[in-house]
Image (tube, rainbow, N blue to C red):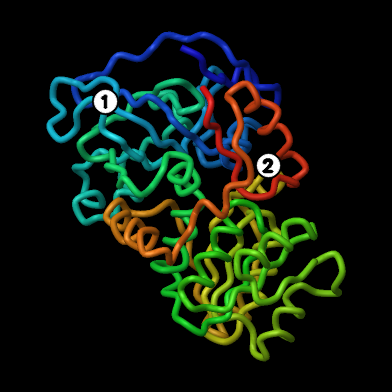
């Protein structure tokens, strides 16, 4: 089968023939119908995250935002059969640790990230295996198509968990979104759909224009103002109620925190680059005196999928609006490399394998 393989960090992915996977007893094989290309794939391709012991090895098949059809079923799998339409979260849990049992599979003690670990080949391929398939595969409702689910796969669901669960977003809240890539645009759309007032902050007008289309009530080009946090303060009067760093660089993280008003909530979604290596200075005294909350947000618990699907069925959320372009597997290497300049608008999704 065809797959896009990370042969060397920073070098173009190699599209080549690899062996079709056989399922282990707990696994299913999913034939990929769609898979998003995410900034996390770009981080892996760059060789980031060694500072947290999560560097992705060369030889890895990337891709962690998939949807597809079950093509083979392991002997111990009980709830899935060939032909099932499924979504697969990027954080593959074991289904048995305390976090998984309590409905927080995204915090699994032995989580294996799909496409970002040698133990979980990814979905930049015609097919891929899923461990503990009874636990990790989510059957896809008929009203959600494959490309739309790939748009949901990492960035959209992460933004939903960040706002609805971690920040406890309420109607009427001011939400500052720093960085309008895939996860940032998803946060804009979700915040607006949930009755909040999103403010989009980025350095590219093209992304800010897309944010406006998705419901941003105000936009800020941070290259055109003296201070992005100051501009947020001016718009809101007292600072944002919720602010998200959707990029993961030192500037956007600090700007997000200092955009907040008293008792505001910052949510860190973007993972850092080799520039920060996970370490960012923050105004701790201000955070203490204003009782600012700082939350991390990683993926979304599996138990939240049903709510997300219901909101899509009702027309409240439309993840298809975040999709930037559809492309073939052969185009994936160039698209991934183009993320160097941060100019990708929306979520690119592979639909031809």
User: Where is residue 96 drawn, in percent x and y?
Assistant: 19, 42
Residue at the location (61% across, 64% down)? 214
Relative placement, left or right, of 120 versus 258 is left
**Residue at horizontal 46 percent and vertical 73 percent from the top:** 194
Dot 1: element: strand
Residue nearer the viewer, 89 or 288:
89
Which residue has dot 2 on it? Answer: 274
Q: Position of residue 41 (x, y in %)?
A: 57, 36
Nearer to the camera, 27 or 318: 318
Between the residue at mark 2 and the residue at mark 1, the CA separation in whole angstroms equals 35 Å
Q: Which residue is mark 1?
A: 28
**Percent position (x, y) of residue 51?**
57, 40
Q: Tell me where residue 338 sits by quadrant.
A: top right
Residue 221 falls in which quadrant of the image? bottom right
Crowdedness of circle 1 by 10 Å Cα count: few (<14), some, many (20+)?
many
Relative horizontal placement of residue 89, taking residue 4 as reference (left or right): left
Going from N to C along the chain, the mark reached first, 2 or 1, is 1
């Amino acid at each position: 089968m065809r797959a896009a393989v990370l042969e060397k960090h920073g070098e173009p992915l190699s599209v080549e023939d690899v062996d079709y996977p056989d399922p282990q007893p707990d696994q299913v094989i999913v034939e990929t119908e769609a898979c998003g290309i995410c900034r996390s794939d770009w981080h892996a391709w760059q060789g980031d995250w060694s500072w947290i012991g999560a560097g992705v090895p060369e030889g890895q098949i990337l891709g962690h935002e998939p949807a597809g059809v079950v093509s083979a079923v392991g002997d111990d799998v009980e709830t899935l059969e060939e032909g099932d339409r499924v979504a697969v979260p990027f954080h593959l849990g074991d289904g048995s640790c305390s976090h998984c049992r309590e409905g927080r599979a995204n915090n699994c003690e032995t989580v294996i990230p799909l496409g970002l670990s040698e133990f979980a080949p990814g979905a930049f391929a015609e097919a891929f295996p899923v461990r503990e398939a009874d636990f990790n595969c989510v059957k896809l409702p008929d009203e959600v198509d494959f490309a739309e689910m790939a748009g949901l796969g990492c960035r959209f669901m992460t933004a939903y968990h960040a706002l609805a669960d971690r920040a406890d977003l309420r109607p009427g809240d001011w939400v500052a979104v720093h960085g309008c890539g895939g996860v940032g645009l998803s946060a804009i759309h979700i915040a607006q759909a949930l009755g909040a007032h999103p403010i989009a902050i980025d350095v590219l007008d093209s992304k800010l224009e897309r944010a406006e289309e998705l419901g941003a009530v105000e936009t800020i080009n941070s290259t055109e103002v003296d201070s992005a946090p100051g501009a947020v303060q001016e718009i809101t009067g007292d600072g944002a109620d919720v602010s998200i760093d959707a990029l993961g660089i030192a500037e956007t993280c600090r700007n997000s925190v200092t955009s907040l008003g008293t008792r505001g909530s910052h949510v860190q979604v973007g993972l850092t680059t080799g520039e920060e290596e996970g370490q960012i200075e923050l105004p701790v005294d201000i955070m203490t005196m204003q009782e600012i909350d700082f939350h991390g947000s990683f993926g979304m618990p599996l138990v939240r999928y049903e709510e997300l699907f219901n909101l899509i069925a009702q027309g409240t959320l439309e993840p298809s609006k975040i999709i930037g372009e559809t492309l073939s597997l052969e185009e994936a290497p160039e698209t991934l490399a183009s993320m160097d300049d941060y100019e990708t608008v929306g979520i690119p999704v592979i639909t031809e394998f």
